[in-house]
Each structure stands twice: as structure tokens, then as C-alpha cells.
Amino acid sequence: MRFDLKAYREPNGVILLALDAADLPSARRQAETQGYRVLSARAAGRFSLQRLASGRGFSVSLFGQELLALLDAGMSLVEAVAILAAKARHAEARRILGELHRLVCEGRTFSKSLAAVPGAFPALLVATVRASEQTGNLPEALRRYLAYHRQLNSLRDRVVSASVYPLVLTGVGALVVLFLLGYVVPRFSKVYEDIGEAHLPMLSRWLMHWGQIAGDHAFALGMGFLSFTAGFAYALTRPETRSAIERRLWRLPAIGEQLRIYQLARFTRTVAMLLKGGVPLVSALDMTAELLRQPALQSGLEAARNVIREGRAVSDAFGAHGLATDVGIRLLVVGERSGELGETMERIAGFYDDEIARSVEWFSRLFEPALMLMIGLLIGGIVILMYLPIFELASSIQ
């Protein structure tokens, strides 16, 4: 099996290697025995979201991985950024890395250089790097941020993967229903015109009426459907529409609670990453406010920050304003006693992730069969209503 590797070796710099190996670790070991430092590796020809993202622009996670590999190889920060800027393929990545290299060469700190490139690097990465500059351990800060990024994406990927099959099933079912109602039923309605509606069951008469309307006004109905679809898609792109949908989802008992736990998981994990990086708690809460989209959580975070500034315990503040579950509050009490609040919040975030994973698995096992049954009944009902007059006619002839 062939693998594509991006590797570094003096004096060649960063090059691309294509190696044949049994698996990915074997390909890495093969390149390392040749004196290369492997920056990234993937199976040749395999589709990758990271590859797609980096191909369209600048990938912060890929930049962090490559920079960490070069720093671990013993290179200085200026040399590592210069190599990455020189080897960038795409215009957006070359622009960002070139600007970053210029700022670092001017003598600015790495965190200020990252912040000075507009819209390129997230504030959490800048804060993590700024905290590491006090200890001089930039590689450890990059590892911490990359681990946080992987864990955050794994939670999102679980939710997305669980929703793919129901969405595909719904889309296929909708297309079949549209085909039946827009093409098959109008032709059946022409067949039944000579029989007379009096011989048809009531539901079949309604279906045949729809077939006649669809057959006589096919163009108008098609244009109306396309206009409705385009308008609906445009409405979903509007922030006010998405906000309105979110507000209604928050009010649903089961779904609203799971959305709350999902946002608490992201919020708690981000705060944990910042605390372990040396960022003060109040500053970490200020930086993570945008992760909480539910209005109740936003107001709760604002109130919790105020009482924490007054010297109240974190467990009391989070518990009183809904920023932690009952189990999370108990764990916060233990973390405050041991002085390891960052590790405790990381543990709480893992507990939230497990709870969401269990809910997603339960939802998939329950909802997918119910959705298949509903679509099957809908399609089967349409088919039966179309053929029921034929069955009755054959019975009457016998």
C-alpha cells in the first residue's frame, strides 16, 4: 500500500515522499530510518477532510502539527516558520505564513505575531502561546492545543456521523415520494378517468384528484417547489433564522437538555485547556463566552464571572448559575480541594462527552427504525391507494 508523507531532513528541507509499506506506522518508520523527520502522513489517494481544508486555504491544525514537528527536531521558531512559509503551496497559506514570518523576524513575541495576522489564528491558540511564553515551553503548548482540537472534533464527528444516515434516509424517502406524487400518480389518474370516481375509495379519490392537478399544472407546481426550496435554503443561511430555530430547540425538553450538555462539554474542555496552559480562571471565562449560545447559559456565565471575581468558589458559582451538572459540581468541589482545577474540568468534559455519546447511540437505535417504518408506511400507503381500485375491479369481475 502506498503512503504520502511530508518529511523534513537537512539540507533538503521539507519534501514529499511516496513510500510503499504494510501500514502507516511502517511507512513512518521507513522514512525515519532514512533520516527524515515525518511531519504528516496519509494513505495515497484517500479522501481527507484535513486535506480538503488545507487545499482550499490555511489549516491551523495542520500548521500546528508541522510547527511542532520542526520544533521537536531542534529548529528555532524563526527557522521553522520560514520553512513552512517557503513550502506553502496555496496563496492563502503563503500570505499568512509570510506575514507571520515577517512579524517574528521583527522581534515580536510569537503570541503577538499570531494575533497581528487578522482572522488567521483563533484567540484560544494565541492565549495558549502567550501563557507558554512565560515558561518558555512552546512545544508543550502546541501539543495541548492540538490535543484539545482533536478531542473537540471527535465530539462533533460523533454527532455528525450519527445524523448522516437519518438525513440520507429522509432525503431518499422524500425523493421517492416526490416521484410517486409528481410522475406516477398523475398517470394513474388518467387511467382511472374512464372508470369514474364513484367506484374509487375516498382516499384513492383524493390521491387521484391530486394526480389530475399535478398533471394539469406540472410546470407551475415544479416552479413553485423550486422556489420554495430555494427560499428555504436561503432562509437557513440567515443568522436570524438559525437563531430562531435554536431558540425553539432549546425549549424542547430532551433535545434542549442534550444541546445544553453539548455546549457545556465544549465550554468546560476549553476552560480546562486554558487553565492547564496558565491562563487565569476569570480570563479563561471571558475568552470562552462565545462558546455558550443558549441565552440562559450566557447570562449564567456573566453572573458566575461576577461572583468568582468576588471570591466565591467555582463550584458554587457554576452550580448556582447552571454551568455544570450535579456530577460536575461534585467534581469541581474535589478539584478545588486538590488544587487541580484544570485536570478536574478536563475530567468533567470527558464525562459530558460520554453522556452525549450514550444519548446519540440511544437516539440512533430508536429513531432510525422509526424513520424507516414511517417512510415505508408513507410510500406503501401511496402505492396501495393507487392499486386498490384495480384490486376491487378484479374482485368485482370475478
Image: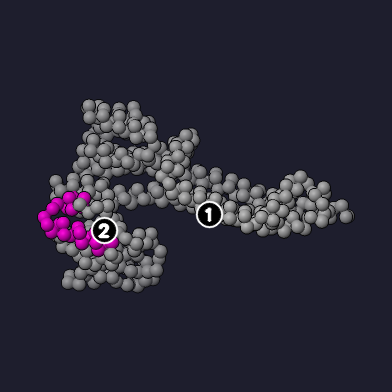
Q: How is the image coloured?
A: one colour
Q: Residue lying furthest left in this view?
A: 107
- Check the image and report above or below for 10 versus 235: below
Task: Inspect this view and state whether residue 308 appears.
Answer: yes
| Residue 325 percent across, percent down from the top left | 38, 33
Q: Nearer the viewer, residue 122 or 157?
A: 122
Secondary structure at badge 2 equals helix
Q: Nearer the viewer, residue 35 or 105?
A: 105
| Residue 6 percent across, percent down from the top left | 28, 67
Q: Which residue is mark 2?
A: 63
Question: Counting other residues with Cα less than 10 Å from the Cα at mark 1, is it few (<14), some (14-19), or many (20 or more)?
Answer: few
| Residue 377 percent across, percent down from the top left | 66, 48
| Residue 37 percent across, percent down from the top left | 23, 65
Query: Residue 301's image quarter?
Result: top left
> Magenta residues, as a range?
92-115
First-in-chain label (2 vs 1): 2
Q: Quadrant of the N terminus?
A: bottom left
Marks 2/1: CA–CA distance: 34 Å
Amino acid type, mark 1:
Val
Q: Which residue is mark 1?
A: 168
Q: Residue at x 38, y 50 (%)?
A: 154
Amino acid type, mark 2:
Phe
